[in-house]
Amino acid sequence: MVKDANGTACTYVCLNVSPSFITANELFTTFVHPYMHASQTPYILLNRKDHWPKQIYQCIQAIQQLIDETPVYYELELNIQLITIWKSLLQNGFQMKHDARKHDKMNG
C-alpha cells in the first residue's frame, strides 16, 4: 500500500496477480479476458463514500494477513479472496457493458 505524499489522504493498492489465478479456464473467457483488455478502464477508483468497496478493502487485508502468516491451505483462501474482489469489481466497478441475456442463454 502506498499513501499519497501530497496530503490528499489517498492510498494506492496494487495486487499483481496472474489472470489465470482468478478463475478457471472455463470462466476466463467471459469474466476475465474482456476486462483485461478494456482500454476504457485503466484504473478503478474505490471511493470510501460508496458501500461496495468496503468488501474489497476487507479482502485486501485478509490477503495481506494470509501472505504474512501462510496458514495451511492459505492458497485456497487467497483464491477465494481474489475471486470475491473480482466479482465485486464486475458487479460495481467496471463500466464495461455485459450482456446478461447472452450469459443467461449459455447457462439456461
Image (tube, rainbow, N blue to C red):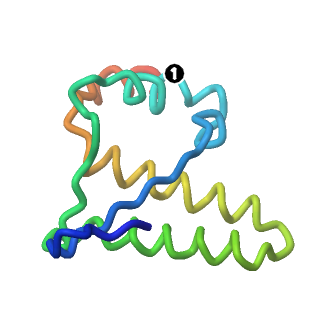
Q: Farthest residue toward the right?
A: 72
Q: Is residue 23 above or below residue 64?
A: above
The residue where tag 1 is placed is 29
Q: In the picture, residue 50 is in which quadrant?
A: bottom left
Q: Position of residue 93 (x, y in %)?
A: 25, 48
Task: Please tell me which residue is depicted at 42% across the width and 28% down the height of the picture.
Answer: 36
Q: Is residue 99 above or below residue 47?
A: above
| The C terminus sits in image quarter | top left
Q: In the picture, residue 69 is in which quadrant?
A: bottom right
Task: Please tell me which residue is depicted at 51% across the width and 53% down the height of the picture.
Answer: 15
Task: Please tell me which residue is depicted at 29% across the width and 66% down the height of the picture.
Answer: 53
**Is residue 90 left or right of 82 when viewed as pictured?**
left
Neighbours of disc 1 within 10 Å: few (<14), some (14-19), many (20+): few
Q: Farthest residue toward the front?
A: 5
Question: Who is closer to the viewer here, 54 or 108?
Answer: 54
Question: Who is closer to the viewer here, 35 or 3?
Answer: 3
* Label 1 secondary element: helix
Q: Position of residue 7 (x, y in %)?
A: 16, 75
Q: Position of residue 57 (x, y in %)?
A: 39, 71
Q: Is residue 53 above or below residue 40?
A: below
Q: Position of residue 105 (x, y in %)?
A: 39, 21
Q: Is residue 21 above or below residue 68?
A: above
Amino acid at pointer 1: Thr
| The N terminus sits in image quarter | bottom left
Task: Please tell me which residue is depicted at 55% across the width and 46% down the height of the picture.
Answer: 16
**Is residue 58 left or right of 76 when viewed as pictured?**
left
